[in-house]
Every structure is written in C-alpha cells, then in structure tokens.
Image: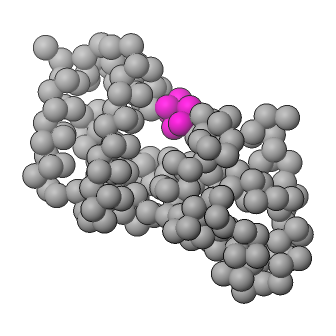
Amino acid sequence: MSYIDQVQDISQPVTDRGMATKKKLLEAADGCFGQRGFFPTSIVDITREAGVAPGTFYNYFSSKEAILRELVHNLNHKLRKATAIAIEGAPNRLEAERAGFRAFLEWVRNHRNSYRVVRQSEFVDKEMFRWYYRKLGEGYVQGLQAAMDAGEVAHYNPEVLAYCLMGIGDFMGMRYVLWQEEEVPEDVFEEMMRFILSGLERR
C-alpha cells in the first residue's frame, strides 16, 4: 500500500466531538514531534498533551507512524493553500515568486514545529517524505511552465528550476527561522530575491 493510500485509508470521525478529539491529537503530535522529536515521543506523551485517555488514540490512529503520515499530509495541503492564496492576483510570475517566498517563510515562522516534523519524516517513512516534496513540486512545475509559455520568465527545465527554488526556500527557512528562531531579515530576503529574480528574468 502506498503512502497516500495509507493516509486515505484512515477512518474519519463522524461526530463533531470525534473530529475535535482527532484535531487535538494531531495538534499534540505536531507539538511533541516538533519539540522532542519523533522517536523520543511516545503515544502516551501525545495523549497526555491532548488531554485524552491513552486508549483514545487508537480510535483514530493505528500507530505513531500513522498520525505522522496524516500530519505530513495535512501540512502539505495547508502550505500549498497558503502559497496559492499569497500569489493569487500577482500581476506576473516574478511578483508571484516574491509573494510565494514571503508566504513560505512566514508559514515556517508560524509553524516551526510542523516544519521540523516534515524534516523528521524522512527518517520514519521515506516514501512519505518524498511524496511531500513531489506534491509541492508538481504544482510549482505547472506554474513555472505556464509562465515560460506566456513569455514571463526565461526558459529552463521547469522541474529542475522548481526543485532549485524549493531548495533555496527550504534552506533559508532552516538557516534563519529554525536555527536563529527569527524572521528572515528584510535585507537578506531582498538579496535572496535579487538572486532568484535575476535568474528568472528573460534576457
């Protein structure tokens, strides 16, 4: 069974109370994994943080790995949505890139634990980790290809370009937001964008 099949196979609660309990468990797992790490965290740690009985966990998730999979799936969806909202209405692809990078770094700043969760997932389920970045990459490739077709940016292999740009955002978030626990300084952001936009501009 593939990673995405495992996520979609999870039974969903049908009552408001059940959905609220599941949400508390996911938020607790996000905090525990982000602060303590996946492997040191136990299911009891998660249920204690969520304020529910230990046995309640198994009404929603079959294992610690299962709740991590759903976390990663949800985080992917939320990040893509936040980025899509940020670039909506941008007059061109260069401005969309600026808005998208700013939105990504802001998302990391507001979801430090979640960002750490994604990075840890590589050591728990490699397929899940790869799915996360491939899913982000798919949409990015489409947007870049459309911009190339419209003559808004220089022509490159769109998949290569997408992963290069994702790597820049990923490491800038790690360097400043995670390591120093601060916003990316504005002068650093502008220097990053100067490099990116100069590479994207048509010659």
Q: Which of 82 and 54 is in front in this view?
A: 54
**Which residue lies at the image location 27% right of the left edge and 62% below the top edge?**
180
Q: Quadrant of residue 68?
A: bottom right
Percent across and percent down for residue 61 are 83, 62
> Residue furthest toward the bottom?
51
Q: Does residue 170 show up magenta in the picture?
A: no
Q: Main secondary structure of the magenta part?
A: helix
**Which residue lies at the image location 23% right of the left edge and 24% below the top edge?**
200
Q: Is residue 57 left or right of residue 174?
A: right
Percent across and percent down for residue 30 are 59, 66
Q: Quadrant of residue 170?
A: top left
Q: Is residue 57 left or right of residue 128?
A: right
Magenta-tinted stretch = 133-139
Residue 13 visible, this angle: no
Q: In which quarter of the image is residue 117?
A: bottom right
Q: In which quarter of the image is the N terminus?
A: top right
**Which residue lies at the image location 59% right of the left edge and 42% below the top edge?**
122
Percent across and percent down for residue 148 are 33, 18
> Residue furthest toward the front?
40
Q: Quadrant of the C terminus?
A: top left
Q: Does residue 135 show up magenta in the picture?
A: yes
Residue 160 visible, this angle: yes
